[in-house]
Amino acid sequence: MSLVMHVDAAAWRAHQDRVASSTEGIVPVAKGNGYGFGLPRLAAEASRLGVDTLAVGTAEEVAAVRSGSAGGLASAGGAGLPGFEGDVVVLTPWRPGDEVAEPLLEEPHVITTLSRVEDVAAVAAAHPGARVILEALTSMARYGLRADEFPEAVEAAQGLEIVGWTIHLPMIGEHLGEATDLATAALAAHRAPLWVSHLRPTDLDRFRRTFDVPVRPRIGTELWLGADGALHYQASVQEVHDVTADQRVGYWQRRAGRRHHRLAVVSGGTANGVAMQAPTAAATVRQVIQTLANGAMEAGRMALSPYSAGGRKLFFAEPPHMQASLLWVPPTVQVGDELEVTMRATTATPDQIILD
Ligand SMILES: *Cc1c(COP(=O)(O)O)cnc(C)c1O
């Protein structure tokens, strides 16, 4: 058996339907590990939702949402899923010399993001008629044109189809004013829909009322991962060993010690994203303390694992390897038991996804 993500499909889809129906012009985002579901699965869900456009992160990901077979887990049902037939917008801005992104400029159902005047000019020269979105630089300090460059970019875009302007905002803080200023400058240079990310619901409403062009909110996390309790991860106990205090175990031949008597080999390892932590913003004091406590335990070679038995987190016997982990378990744990695993969906790659 393997590391399995169980999805309560009815609850998951009911949540998606709620988000989609309450967000006019929604553009679902499917990128990276597909928020734990894989890109083909999200492409199929986007088709089910009936949206006209799906956003992906990179040019490479276009193929993964088009054909149900590419870029996903075969066991997760990647093969045979319907690909997404509508428009696909690539969120990472185009750069010259990208051999995967270049031919996409000729595809009528792909929208390319441009973030520099020189890139707009290069695309206009080489691919007249290409469909593009122009990105505005925000306080994210990622990619984008400064507001004073907007008229120049529009001038350089002659012959291109400007599908919209994009404004990608930080997750925290007050950004309605910034978004409004950028949109005002953008529409003064060229009228086109406004594609926005991470405006809060109330700010989004005000933003919509301020401008008379379509607004396209791009949403990933809330859409795919917002259904409380709809997802859980399970691993199985594949082997157990009763050990003595002097016994050395695992790749690193650590001594079991007096506190541990039973070793379990369980499914799931680094290949699945087990014990991979995305750096957190550690926004709360509690999170900071947790991080420090985990660090202290690791320094003492007692690392708390994401696996639990009977509601209690278990300790790793050693750092996890590719597809298996060694854990110290209570005597009650038997071969064949299923353990709950706490995974962060955006760094998880389950072996199987089961839609219950
Ligand atoms: C990833 C991404 C999103 C989606 O972000 P979530 O926080 O997952 O909703 C939206 N816009 C852009 C530009 C992105 O790169």
Image (tube, rainbow, N blue to C red):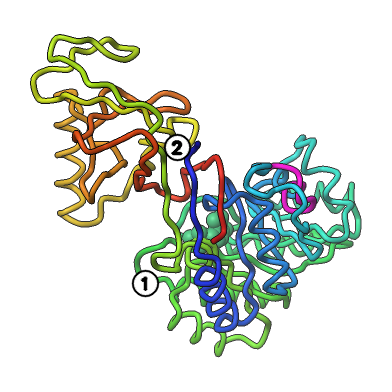
Q: Amino acid at mark 2?
A: Gly
Q: Quadrant of residue 171?
A: bottom left
Q: Is residue 138 visible?
A: no
Residue at image mark 1: 174
Mark 1 vs ligand 1: CB under 8 Å? Answer: no
Question: Residue 297 vs residue 19: left or right?
Answer: left
Q: Nearer the viewer, residue 49 or 189?
A: 49
Where the C terminus falls, by quadrant?
A: bottom right
Q: Which mark is residue 269?
A: none
Q: Residue at x 22, y 21 (%)?
A: 242
Q: Secondary structure at mark 1?
A: loop
Residue at image mark 2: 273
Circle nearer the N terminus (2, 1): 1
Q: Is residue 60 above or below residue 52?
A: above
Question: Residue 294 vs residue 170: left or right?
Answer: left
Which percent across, then down, holds residue 131? 82, 61
Which percent across, then down, holds residue 286? 16, 54
Is residue 75 part of the magenta span, yes or no? no
Q: Amino acid at mark 1?
A: Glu
Q: How many marks?
A: 2
